[in-house]
Amino acid sequence: MNSTPGTSKAAAAIDKARSEGRTALIGYLPAGYPSVQESIDAGIALAKNGADLIEIGIPYSDPVMDGPVIQEATNKALRNGFAVADVFKVVEGITSATNTAVLVMTYWNPVVRMGVDEFSRRLAEAGGAGLITPDLIPDEAAEWMEASDRYGLDRVFLVAPSSSPKRMAATVQASRGFVYAVSVMGITGARTTVGEAARAVVDAAHAAGAERVCVGLGVSRSEHVREIAAYAEGVIVGTALVSALTDGGPAAVGQLMADLSTGSARKEP
């Protein structure tokens, strides 16, 4: 993977967790939900309760990868007047109050509409670590590759059970920070089990040269974290945290992250 110590905030956070015998915990929250300030407060709660990285999602009108919980949250943010530029307020609000690396997860269209260079510059100025781009593949990402190098941003691409060996290798090579392994085919949502597919995708990414692989989609309980910690460098939790935010506000987000962190100790296979 094209990452070197000192140039990647995400890699540094994951490596720090690894040095402490843990898998990194990454918490996802949608920007602007229920409001811009509450999403900042929830992000700070994540950072104070065990999150090694924070992933802030940009609400999008056609979120093909998101399940009903996240869709409803993002739709509410949009109804409340969320604008794409507000994501920089959320990122800056969290990074100015914590030392936790913050990445933005976004479909590619909002970045193109703002301008790839302008978006990248503003993200860097807000203290952001980089972008996770679920619908952008490396061979269509030349402009983003240039901008991410220009502004020192991480670029996180996704791999899935359906990724061919060729696609896996190209994605690992293009990524900086970590590779995002989708554990199941389909949309986001809390599940009772994570399944063997997650391990197979992580193993394939490692075999293709990835130093850091983080697993997302379906993680909702500390036992999931414990299971994934045996073979992945990071665990991404989304839907469960959004549900906690809906039900109990930022305090509930912090409480759930604290509970999830009890499963993060790594037991090497």
Image (cartoon, rainbow, N blue to C red):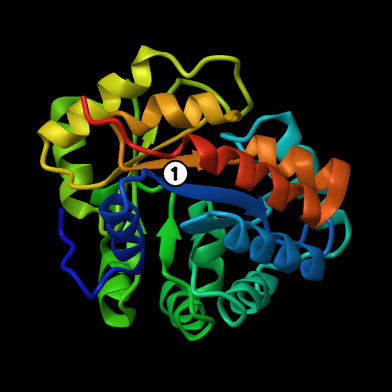
Residue placed most toward the observer, 202 or 20? 20
Left or right, 159 with respect to 1, comes to: right
* Residue visible at 66% across and 36% down in the picture: 239
Residue placed most toward the observer, 28 or 254? 254
Q: Position of residue 54 (x, y in %)?
A: 53, 58
* Residue visible at 44% across and 29% down in the picture: 226
Which type of secondary structure does the marked residue at label 1 adopt? loop
Task: Give above or below for 58 relative to 72.
Answer: below
Quarter of the image where the C terminus is located: top left
Task: Give above or below for 47 relative to 162.
Answer: below
Residue type at mark 1: give it.
Asp
Q: Position of residue 31 (x, y in %)?
A: 69, 60
Residue placed most toward the observer, 169 or 241? 241
Left or right, 70 with respect to 151, comes to: right
Q: Which residue is labeled 1 in the image?
A: 135
Q: Position of residue 79 (x, y in %)?
A: 87, 55
* Residue visible at 44% across and 80% down in the picture: 124
Q: Looking at the image, can residue 162 be seen?
A: no
Q: Position of residue 106 (x, y in %)?
A: 53, 54
